[in-house]
Amino acid sequence: MKLQGSLAERDVPDLIQALHERRYSGKLILTHMGVGRSLTVQEGRLVFGMSSDPDDRMGELLLRQGKITLRQYADASQAVGPGKRLGGILVEQGVLEPKELVKAVTEQSQHVIYRSFDLTEGQYRIQEGLEATEAITLKISTPDIILEGIRRIDLWSRIERAVGSLETRYVRARGYEKVLSEMTLSLEKL
């Protein structure tokens, strides 16, 4: 597997699937137009996602969800500094309960990962063997994440490029039963 390359040549779902199959541990770093996303993988499982895109930040996510007010966001943002993250400050200030912070971090991480599936241009780089340092990690299976990420793609040209035209015939992949056993599928998705 190439440790770096173009996202025009290798899709994000393909990269994630390859890392999952190899039980890889490290980071998948994606860059496009000055925005970087870092997806942490432990033994083939996606466990965390970070982004430099302002729209992916915790505060913006909590604002969009109506969990905090603009005033609470502004006050907490002023206290952010080395070793002090926004979520922890919101808990210290009594704006969020610790349980709400865990849920928000999980949702933010998923948001970053799922937005990565939209990338068709840019670069990828794989950093091997880095230990995950985040206290809050995802507990979702990688096949479930891949399925959901692909489900969220809504550009027909992108879908057709990946799955072929309407005349394409499909066959079950070798070993599909093992992958299905790792997933939590509703009857509709199955």
Image (cartoon, rainbow, N blue to C red):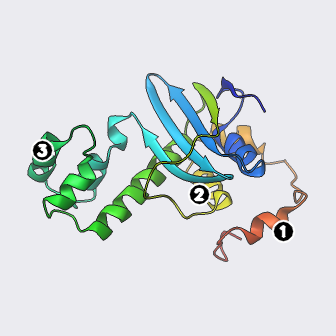
Q: Quadrant of residue 53?
A: top left
> Distance between the Cα atoms at labels 3 and 2?
33 Å
Q: Can you give x and y, in whole percent of width and height, for residue 20 in the image? A: 72, 51
Kind of residue sitting beneath label 1: Glu
Mark 1 crowdedness (10 Å alpha carbons): few <14, some 14-19, many ≥20: few
Q: Nearer the viewer, residue 4 or 158?
A: 4
Q: Closer to the observer: label 1 or label 2?
A: 1
Disc on the earlier residue, 1 or 2? 2
Residue 119 against residue 134 in the figure, above or below? above
Residue 80 found in image quarter: top left
Give the residue type at disc 3. Answer: Ala
The residue under the point 82% across, 66% down is: 178
| Residue at the farthest bottom position | 187
Q: Secondary structure at mark 2?
A: helix
Quarter of the image for residue 140 reads: bottom right
Which residue is label 2 attached to? Answer: 148
Label 3, secondary structure: give it: helix
Locate the C terminus and report the quarter of the image it occupies. Answer: bottom right
Label 1's element?
helix
Question: How far is mark 3 from mark 1, CA to CA?
Answer: 49 Å
Which comes before the other along the chain, label 3 or label 2?
3
Q: Which residue is mark 1?
A: 177
Residue in the picture at 20% in, 53% down: 89
Does 55 sit left or right of 32 as displayed?
Answer: left
Q: Check residue 74 in the rendering and tell me which mark sits there, or answer none.
A: 3
**Is residue 123 positioned above or below 168 on the image?**
above
User: How far is mark 1 from mark 2, CA to CA?
Assistant: 18 Å
Closer mark to the observer between disc 3 and disc 2: 3
Of callouts 3 and 1, which one flags the residue occurring earlier in the amino acid sequence?
A: 3
Residue at position x 12%, y 44% in the image: 74
User: Given contact means CB atoms under 8 Å apart, are the residues at marks 3 and 1 in contact?
Assistant: no
